Amino acid sequence: MPLVIYTLLRLALFGAAFGLLYLAGLRGWLLPIVAVVVALAVSYLALGKPRDAAAQWMATRAERRAAERAAAPKVDVDAAHEDAQLDQELRTDRPG
């Protein structure tokens, strides 16, 4: 959830920068580029806590996923298929 909050704050900063620059008279293709640069600088300076919270959330999530992957049984799909075929062949080859 911190990632969503941080993203929304960054989008709000971009919207504010875009609007202020538009009102200041900047138009054309330069407007969105300057708005992105301004929003980037302001977000770097003003959004330290939300950025750290989002980074911590992502790191915790990555660690949890890595632990889940390590704990999951590793099944080689090809080997399992070959084993099943061999088992089937052995059952049909038996005299009965």
Image (tube, rainbow, N blue to C red):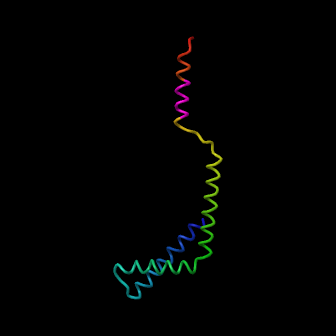
23 or 59, which lies in front?
59
52 or 3, which lies in front?
52
Check the image and name the residue furthest to the left: 28
Splitting the image into 4 quarters, where does residue 33 fall? bottom left
Check the image and name the residue furthest to the bottom: 24
90 or 26, which lies in front?
90
Seen at 64% across and 57% down, the residue is 63
Tell me: 75 left or right of 17. right
Residue 74 locus on image (x, y percent):
60, 42
Check the image and name the residue furthest to the top: 96
Seen at 37% across and 80% down, the residue is 30
Q: Is residue 62 above or below residue 25?
A: above
Q: Provide the residue span drawn in magenta.
A: 79-87
Seen at 34% across and 80% down, the residue is 28
Residue 62 locus on image (x, y percent):
60, 58
Seen at 60% across and 73% down, the residue is 50
